[in-house]
Image: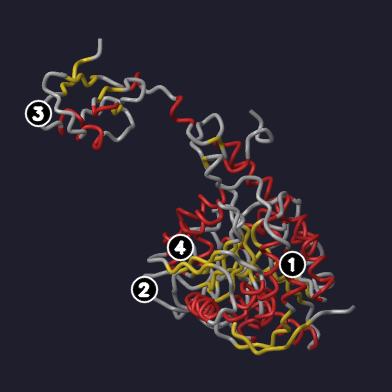
Amino acid sequence: MQTQTARVAALQGDEAVAEAVRQCDVDVVAAYPITPQTIIVEKLAEFVADGRFRGEFVPVESEHSAMSACVGAAATGARVFTATSSQGLAYMHEMLYNVAGMRFPIVMAVANRALSAPLVLNADHGDMMASRDCGWIQFYAENVEEIYDRTIQLFKLSEDPRVMLPSTINFEGFILSHDKERVRLLGDEPIKKFLGRPKPKHRIDPDYPLTFGAIATPDTYYEFRVQQTEAMKNALHVLDEVEMEFESFSGRRYGVVDAYNTDSADVVMVINGSAGGTMRATARALNAAGERVGVLAIKLYRPFPAEQIVSNLAHARAVITMDRSLSPGAPSGPISEDVKSAMQLAGLNKPVLSVVYGIGGRDLSTDDGKNIFGMAKEGSAFGTSTVMYGVKV
Amino acid sequence: MSWKQLEEGAVVKGGTSASYIVSGWRVEKPVINEAKCTNCLICWIYCPEPAIVRHEGGKVTIDYDHCKGCGICETECPPKAITMVREP
């Protein structure tokens, strides 16, 4: 396949996002710096100062204002981007629902970081999971090139008239945001051609005043929310088209899940984010030693690709779910609950080992992966409560 | 109405609240004593709704279709020209 890699660069995850946004012909960026996302905002400000980015950069006083400014910009039909993390995402929470409700295709990068207190700068998925139900499309990346590619794809997916929902690319703070990796950058021109320009049905016009997100009653609110769930369903199919077109000039395609050896594994581990690669390496080593394990990495979390997940669990004897977020008092983590409910709906009754790991940036090594697969082999951990893997007792 | 028929994003034509009558919300209505009124326009500034109508020459009247009866105009009026009167 003929691909159009313009150049190869060593980029941090944050830098890759900034480069993608520069190439995506974004009109407005309103953002507030927060570790570990700051590099994105800094880089974009630098691009503006150097005349390499024609978009408007709005330095706001908070994340609530950042998303509010994005709403105003999106209402004019502009292509809009922002980035945040942890407390910043929590501070945006109210506005996230407004963006989804007004159906603005805003794209946001989230360098995942655990929430305070106690204050911590390192990664877990707790920030995005706390905003899980906000009506935004949610992707999780595994490496820097994927962050770059997805950022570009998100504009196309969000702006599709069948979707018109905001979207996020999630990647763990420091682990991916600050990790320098090899990225095959694409040319400005093919990206421009791929994306085109946003064509919203409605936009603010002084000559024809409109109200966005007008007041609803118990008679209509439910229906507006159902419109969002229908758009989410559409996003699954539209993503397929977007990925196919993206592949035609980049040679790269990700899908909604990445399945390794799920067809012939006794135990399949379901995971998302950067640890997917680590667990795949673990599984390869275990399989080389005669075990039969597989890894299913979830790339797209909302809409939840239940069908693709269940079909990859059909052959396994048992399932391990891995959650990098902790919901105190919940029966298990959000990924575990979603996987189990998808299995139940599909009539798949298998033992599931729910594991919480990597909280507040705690590392997950291949040795840890071996331990967790080992727990599933013993079988004694099944049927008990969620395993808090690696916690000091 | 089916979810398929509603305009996505709850987008509606602007300025529709002008056609919405809120007079039924009131318990008391403001009444202006024209003899005391100095046309200072303090009520016009303070009214949270556009319910004080300013006429040519500074004269003010009340738009009872959009007055919710909050009484701020009575409180703020310097010459005490506005009185809240119980609605029948």
Which residue position is annotated with label 2?
A118
Q: Spatial distance from mark 2 to mark 3, Cα to Cα?
A: 57 Å
Mark 2 surroundings within 10 Å by alpha-carbon count, few (fewer than 14), some (14 through 19), many (20 or more): few
Mark 3 surroundings within 10 Å by alpha-carbon count, few (fewer than 14), some (14 through 19), many (20 or more): few
SS state under label 4: helix
Give the amino acid type for the residue marked by disc 4 in the picture.
Ala
SS state under label 1: strand
Disc 1 and disc 3 in contact, CB within 8 angstroms: no
Disc 4 and disc 3 in contact, CB within 8 angstroms: no
Residue A66's disc number? 4
Say yes or no: labels 1 and 3 on the same chain.
no
Can residue A336 be seen here? The reply is: no
| Residue at position x 61%, y 66% in the image | A26
Query: Mark 2 or mark 4, which is nearer to you?
Result: 4
Q: Residue furthest front?
A: B57
Which residue position is annotated with label 1?
A257
Find residue A290 and report its horizontal and vertical position in percent.
Answer: 81, 85
